[in-house]
Image: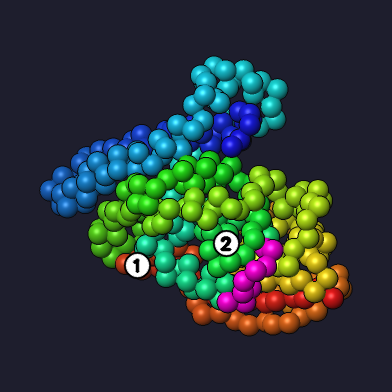
Amino acid sequence: MLSEPKSCCASCYYSFQNYVQDVVEQFEELITIAEEEDNDLLKDYILRMKEVRDLSETNTPFLESIVSLYTKQFKTEEDVEKSLEHSCCTLNKHNMSRISDVIQQTVREWSGEGSYVRDSCFRVLLDEIGTKKRVLVPGCGLARLPYELVKNGNECYACECNHYMILTLNALIQAKKEAFTICPYLVFTSDLVSSDFQRLKLKIPDVAPNEFLSQVKFSEEDFVTYTEKSQVTFDVVCTCYFMDTAFDAVEYITSIFKVLKSGGQWVNLGPLHWVNNCISSFHFTLEEIIQIAKRVGFTLVKNSEMKSTTYIPQRDCTTPVTYLPRLFIMSKP
């Protein structure tokens, strides 16, 4: 659990709290514009917008389960505002896009609908890692991969420093199987073949997360900070859709090397769709990543291209976002 109402945490908290109303207001505006345009020609569109607006409430129980864990921590808005008087961050209470991303991440990791996208990457990782290993998973998101690793007979450690993910994960860990119904795609207004996808209802989580997540040793520190402090060494560091989150991938590579045992392996799967667009951020090619890793001391064991896959389920979309992730394995002598 997060320990104090820092600015970034408070922004997450209020964004979760306000999300349903923010979505309702967004669709109210779309309905008003459409009705002013041509009520007769757009009647089907207007009806769909009203249906989607009303379905927004479906997400309330899940979001309230997240918010309820932190009501005592954040107390009143006045208390939070006062605690942030000397903060360099700005409080954002209406970050709809981040909440939508987390809801879609929940679909990927903890719904039956997401099983095929999980299988497209988790299955090969589980096969490569095997069992009875001590594994570190940096940037674990909502921790389905650590769950599967423990289920497969491994000892698992995991890092996640994104507060939106942490707040959601804390709620999921306490949830029973299929405790919530969500409508994850309500805010998808483009690229739709059918409105059925937008109105889709899903049960989450598809399993009881705590059955195996209770055995995972979590850290809320960023990966580099965690490795600087870690007294533990690992048989495997497994990076899944993680390397391209780096501002400086060299730090990631040297940190991975540091915490691996002699003979340990770095197992990586994911794209190189670098998310940091700062001019001083390094955007390496795969060849450069491999060359840097060799200079650090790694030996390349495997390098292969995986099948095209989406990150989240996107059926009935005209332009699904697909990836051609790479799998490579490095060994520490």
Q: In screen coordinates, is 21 left or right of 247?
A: left
Q: Which residue is mark 1?
A: 315
Would you place residue 59 above or below residue 108 in this image?
A: above
Would you place residue 33 above or below residue 291 in this image?
A: above
Q: In screen coordinates, is 212 left or right of 47?
A: right
Would you place residue 249 above or below residue 266 in this image?
A: above
Residue 116 at what x, y percent from top left? Answer: 42, 70
Neighbourhood count class around disc 2 (C-alpha, 10 Å): few under 14, some 14–19, many 20 upward: many
Magenta region includes residue 129: yes
Residue 82 at what x, y percent from top left? Answer: 62, 17
Residue 27 in view: no
Residue type for callout 1: Arg
**Residue at 73 percent of width and 67 percent of height:** 235
Quadrant of residue 56 within the rendered picture: top left
- Magenta range is 127-135
Q: Which residue is mark 2?
A: 150
Residue type for callout 2: Val
Q: Are marks 2 and 1 in contact (CB under 8 Å)?
A: no
> Which mark is drawn over residue 295?
none
**Residue at 51 percent of width and 30 percent of height:** 70
Query: N-terminal of the two: label 2 or label 1?
Result: 2
Pick whichever, 54 or 132, lies toward us.
Answer: 132
Pick whichever, 171 or 211, lies toward us.
Answer: 211
Pick whichever, 152 or 318, lies toward us.
Answer: 152
Q: In screen coordinates, is 197 left or right of 124?
A: left
Residue 210 at what x, y percent from top left? Answer: 49, 50
Residue 161 at what x, y percent from top left? Answer: 64, 46
Q: In screen coordinates, is 158 left or right of 61?
A: right
**Secondary structure type for disc 2:** helix
Question: Which quarter of the figure is the C terminus placed in?
Answer: bottom right
Magenta region includes residue 45: no
Would you place residue 209 above or below residue 124 in this image?
A: above
